[in-house]
Amino acid sequence: MAHRALRIIAATALAGSVLTACTTEPASTGGPGGAGKGPSDGKLVMGFAQVGAESGWRTANTKSVREAAEKAGVTLKFSDAQQKQENQIKAIRTFIQQKVDVIAFSPVVESGWDTVLKEAKNAGIPVILTDRAVDSQDTSLYRTFLGSDFVKEGQEAGKWLVKEYEGTSEPVNIVELQGTTGSAPANDRKAGFADAVKGDPKFKVVDSQTGDFTRAKGKEVMQAFLKSHKDIDVLYAHNDDMALGAIQAIEEAGKKPGTDIKVISVDGIKDAFVAMQEKKINVVVECNPLLGDQLMELAKKVAAGESVPRRVEVKEGVFTQDQAAAALPGRQY
Amino acid sequence: MTPPDDIGAGGRRPARAPGARRLTRHRLFWPATFLASLLLGNVAFTHDFFAVRVQNGHLYGSLIDILQFGAPLILVSLGMTLVIATRGIDLSVGSTVAIAGALACEHIATAKDPGSLPTVLSAITLAVGVAAAIGLLNGLLVARLYVQPIVATLVLMVAGRGVAQLITDGQIISVSSSAYKMIGGGYWLTLPFAVLLAAALVAVTSFVTRRTALGMLIESVGGNPVASRLVGVRAAGLLVMVYVVSAVCAAVAGLMISSNVSSADGNNAGLWIELDAILAVVIGGTALTGGRFSVGGTVLGALIIQTLSTTIYTLGVPPETTLVFKALVVMAVCLVQSPAFRARLSRRRRPAASAPAVGDAGVRQQEVHP
């Protein structure tokens, strides 16, 4: 008995969801009509499935999305996946059931999204990827990707170096602290940097090791570098935390970071700006987590049925020491 | 796996055994040889690897680095040795490292005067106290509720990192406190304070376990729980104690790691250190089946692992092949440690005819083996 009742309820709910999905579709594309929308009266509803809160960068990313949603008048349904794909898939299914207008998410891993994204597609809900991509063959499963171009970040770092050593012909010895081996930012930042400095043979990467994106490992590896190479001119770190650890190692070796050894870093966390103000880091290539505003703009466009580019890059800058003091008070993460 | 016991082998061994043979029979001979050859191998690539100079009033050099970065691993492995000697295992130490660092840094960062000694001391007390509670929980699960150690400590290995993240709010907490910096990054009498601290704890542990009956009681509980119960050894209290000691050692290691970089990272601090510690214990000649343990061997094992990391950085092994390189070296250590492997190797090298002439128990044993 109970089973049958449950099944009937489920069937009705399902029918209802299909019906409303059909009615919302023209409403969201048609604009202000909003007949079937109920209490949200024309307000865009977005489901956002975040990776987790694994770093300061990620927390800043979350905060940016929340604030931007409020500012843009978007109702945000937020879910934290705690770095687990199954949680994220569950969250997306819930969003589909709740009939949100747009789903945005940062995939924890690259693969395994086809089924749940097809469900979203069948329900007529557009999907936006933020920060990380999926490797799905079927590109119709999501509308657009909003995030950073890691290769470009590496290139920007290299470009600064080329400019810094313009006009000299003496060899420049570079050590590199890579991110977690095999991760997309590590691979791409390494490739982009190598690409930018390959034109001039005076630039020589004398050593390159992984520092796992952490301060402790960055310091440990840099200490070993300092002992095995006596003439390091430049340190290129794939993120700020490793650079901050390495700076301590350089100081303990009796050298001045930023002067004796030039330090290039990627990300742009607050601590790195403080170090830059103290002239310990020379340049920081920003990897911007504050993509909330751009996300809301894109969400409104896809919900309105407008066409958007397949890939949208986050606005990012390159900060040098003289800009650090001015930029520091505005750093949110 | 374990080399012959000092006491056990003494009975069989002829009194006139040559000094060299006696030396190679020592349980610490192979780990020590391996460590020495690893260090010497570095000299071939970096000629001033052994050079130690005075820099800003303290000693500076690769060897000092190995000791300083190895200190946390030595401490975690020290606690692990005692746990393994009771036939247990403690997987939660990595999370305990993260929790201790997070608690201390959070306490200091929110305090009014982060640089003052009382603040730092209360932070240390807090971290060590919470760690002791974690150890107590592990110990009670194992000793009173008879949960298998690997399962009991797995709970906190997984959940503990979440707790650390909860404490830090998922952020990396930076502290600027010179008093706190002392623990992992400071120097005392020209030596890193962390090294002195680790050495002191190792000395206390070996004294307590070797000069009192405690070590023997631990070995008896691990070696034969039934027999030790029959002779009246109270295993439960001992078990709880070793888990508490292990957690406290991990907490001190956590303080060192976070103090060295003046920040707490709930996600990455002490990640996989439990596996390195287990490896250090095993390299040091303590069997996972419990019983006999060697604190000195564990220290050597931890130093081998740290030297290996430093070697990888100095040699410039590409990061993609780092793990393969490590695996090969660790495999070599394990093979060198294995008496059966050494016996096979020496049998092949030596002509069969000369073997009986030596008239040694070990060689006779080989002849029986195949």
Image: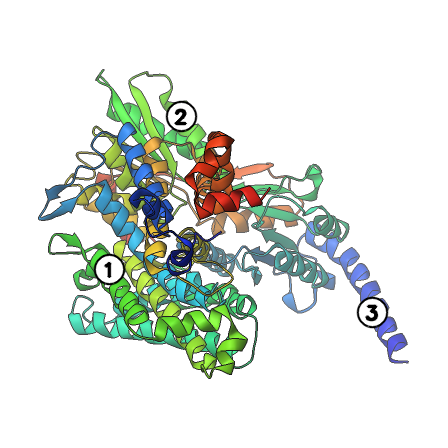
Q: Give the chain letter at badge 3.
A: A
Reading the image, the residue beneath label 1 is: B199
Image quarter of residue B245: bottom left
What's the CA distance linking mark 1 and mark 2? 44 Å
Q: Are marks 1 and 3 on the same chain?
A: no
The amino acid type of the residue labelled 1 equals Ala
Of discs 1 and 2, which sits in the foreground?
1
Q: Measuring 48% from the left and 77% from the top, which residue is drawn there?
A: B228
Report if the CB atoms under discs 2 and 3 are less than 8 Å apart. Answer: no
The answer to whether residue B82 is visible is: yes
Up/down of B342 relative to A19, above or below = above
User: Is B304 on the left or on the right of A83, as rendered?
Assistant: left
Chain assignment, label 2: A
The residue tagged 2 is: A194
User: Could you tell me residue B365's position as x and y percent?
Assistant: 51, 47
**Chain name for mark 1:** B
Point out residue A208 in the picture as x, y percentages from the top left corner.
Answer: 37, 32
Q: Are marks 1 and 2 in contact (CB under 8 Å)?
A: no
**Amino acid of disc 3:** Ala
* x 73%, y 49%: residue: A115
